[in-house]
Image (tube, grey):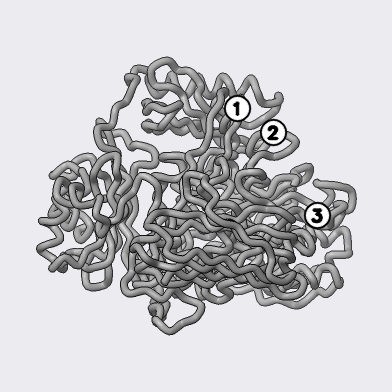
Amino acid sequence: MRGKRIKILTLCGLMLAFLILGGISPVGNGDEDAIVADYIALPMAPGQVDSLAKEAAPLRQSSGFDAFNAQYQNQWKATFSKKTGKVSILYGASSRRYENGPESVAKGFLSDSYAIFGLKGDLSDLKTLRVDETPTRDHVKLQQTHQGVPVYGALVLVHSDQKGQVTMVQNGYIQELRVTNQSLVTEEAAKKAALDDLRASLEQGATIYDAKAEQVIVPWKGEYRFIWKITVPTRDPFGLWVYHIDAASAEILYKGNEILSLKKGVGRAYKTNPHWHMGRISNAPLKNMFTPDEGNIEYYLYGLHADVYDDNYNDPQAPDYRFLYDPYNPTEKPWFDATHTYYQMNTIWDWWEKKVLRRYGPYSPAYFYTLSIPVLVNMGSYCGASYTWDWLGSGIPGFYFGNEGSCAAGSEDLAIDNDVFRHEYTHAMTDWCGFDTQFFDLVNNYGRSMGEGNADWFAYLFSKDPQVGDVAWDWSGAGYLRNLDNTRMYPWDVDYPLWGTPEEHYTGEIWGGYLYDLYQNLRGRALPYVYNAFSYFIPSGGHRASYPDFYDAIWAQVNAEIDLTGGYRSSAKAWGSMAGRGINGALRAPYSHGSDYFYTGGTGSDTNVYFWWNFPPVRSINTKGNLLLTLDWHEYVIGVTQPGMDLSAMVTARTGGLVNPSIYLYTTGGALLVSVGPTTSTKAVLTYPNIPTGTYVVGVTGTATAPARGYYTFKVMVR
């Protein structure tokens, strides 16, 4: 802590009522923007088979699914893992009612149906990790354990409605788990190995706080191993160092600084970034300030949602609660920065509470309603902004922001930038709402990259400016830090060019770009489509098994929409955004690395995974894509389930979008069946009558009128 005068003020036991708002409307069959379908079925992934398919018959019987489903008049649908023969996703119906809250509902249902998922009958190796209640669904996250130790990425998600009826189960349980090493190294020995390495790697004068240890089973080079996960917060430099120490040999398998930050990277305030550029300073309300009755006896910037501290112990004080400072007065500038930060904390708290939590939950995220979050500003020589779940080694979360001039001569204070502030607050909300298993992954892995992309996108929802950090990085050549309106595409832009390996912020621009494109297609439906999916995210079966990746995230979006609405209107619209960022492809090779695949010190490759829409039940899809660069290749995978059908695909574009489009039809084995060039400069039409049953790839390419300006509409029908 920072001395006797620092007092973290909390408000415990705060109870708030919520306005319960309606959910998304189901898809109507007549909507031209939606899929016209006879019934709802999930798109399929490699290694999965739908319960309605002929090849699923032996799996339905051997897994016990047919007997289970007979109890529900055969209303349930499922996908099966071809590898295990068990149900991967159960959906499409509702269970009988269970009592005594979401956790009891989830465990009661799993106890009654454990065999179809390959679980133990007593559920003894499943530990409740989190329970979240929302206006539309309750979400229970169960963690698989082995000898009492959690297995990284092995989750079972159970979703139920307000009547206590289960509506979907996502099964990431690992059957016949084999752990190839033994747990021999003690906790203290593991801590010592991490601390010895950290002391040797940090400069003299660094402050190293107490290490915390947790034993975990993680996938490592194709096998599962016991490790000790050691977490060590530091200052000078700021960091939250995470080590994976092999529990048999004390070998360091992984280490990384996992502090969540933008690298390099009545009071008065700039209410928006454009206001800063215009020099427009506004009087701003400083809400929810603590009085001496709540312990604020020195009248600092302490309040219900934030306690703001100056790194130089130059905290503003105002017994009359009027913190009116001039940012152009060097003496008052640090006070203005702190006041502006307090205003920012209240503003973003209100936004999340009204726009997100009230509408979509969860009702009680950690810390949000019960802790006055500490924020440290004006940190000299720190070119960055950070969220940490261990603020100055205190065991509580908080934020750090660098001072003006810390990034470059004349650069602005990091806390002044609305984009930077909202980016960091998104990291906090992701943590507090329990989405850390997917977005707080190892540094420079896809999970962390998506966390960075999410944070940029949530900042964009406030500003509607795709350029992130245009105040704090106004001094740079570009005039901003990152741009959501970019040309990043999987797998070509996974590696940061200067490193030749992934980097969480650079790689995250693929995901941020996808979300930006998605917003252009969905507009007001984009926020619930993206946010609700966080509760349906399970890191299994994607590009990297057991680790979160882009494919897992888009699959979560599809699952969430089907469970919550019974339809997939938004997922159909999102199909073009997925194709535009290369996230869902069958023919192109996935990301690989010849010497250092995700910092394992060896070669490796992602799994080439994709899903497809089955025609029928789907009859047509109309979606919008964006060819980022000329001759980019977009893949749309479809399954033809009945013989004698005619396929047609059409690409159309407006002036200023895609030019000279071409369409190709391939089998998933790579055999070209037919291709067509442009009918006009902005249109192409492909037809294939009497197409045999099977899975196909419709490829689209052409000329972008400018980078990230290859807009087009894609429509495919099988009738």
The one nearer the camera, 353 or 109, is 109
Crowd class of label 3 (few under 14; some 14 to 19; many from 20; radius 10 Å)? many
> On residue 596, which mark appears?
1
CA distance separating discs 3 and 1? 32 Å
Name the residue that disc number 2 marks.
500
Residue extending farthest top:
249
Disc 2 marks a residue whose amino acid type is: Gly
> On residue 76, which mark appears?
none
> Where residue 434 appears, x then y in whole percent?
43, 54
Q: Is residue 689 left or right of residue 37?
A: right
Asked if the residues shown at circle 1 and circle 2 are in contact, with their CB atoms under 8 angstroms apart, the answer is yes
Name the residue that disc number 3 marks.
473
In primary-sequence order, the first of circles 3 and 1 is 3
Quadrant location, the N terminus:
top right
> Where residue 409 appears, x then y in whole percent?
89, 48
CA distance separating discs 3 and 2? 25 Å
Q: Check disc 2 and report its element: helix, strand or loop.
A: loop
Location of residue 483 by image quarter: bottom right
Location of residue 393 by image quarter: top right
The residue depicted at 66 percent of the width and 66 percent of the height is 460
Q: Is residue 668 visible?
A: yes
The one nearer the camera, 668 or 643, is 643
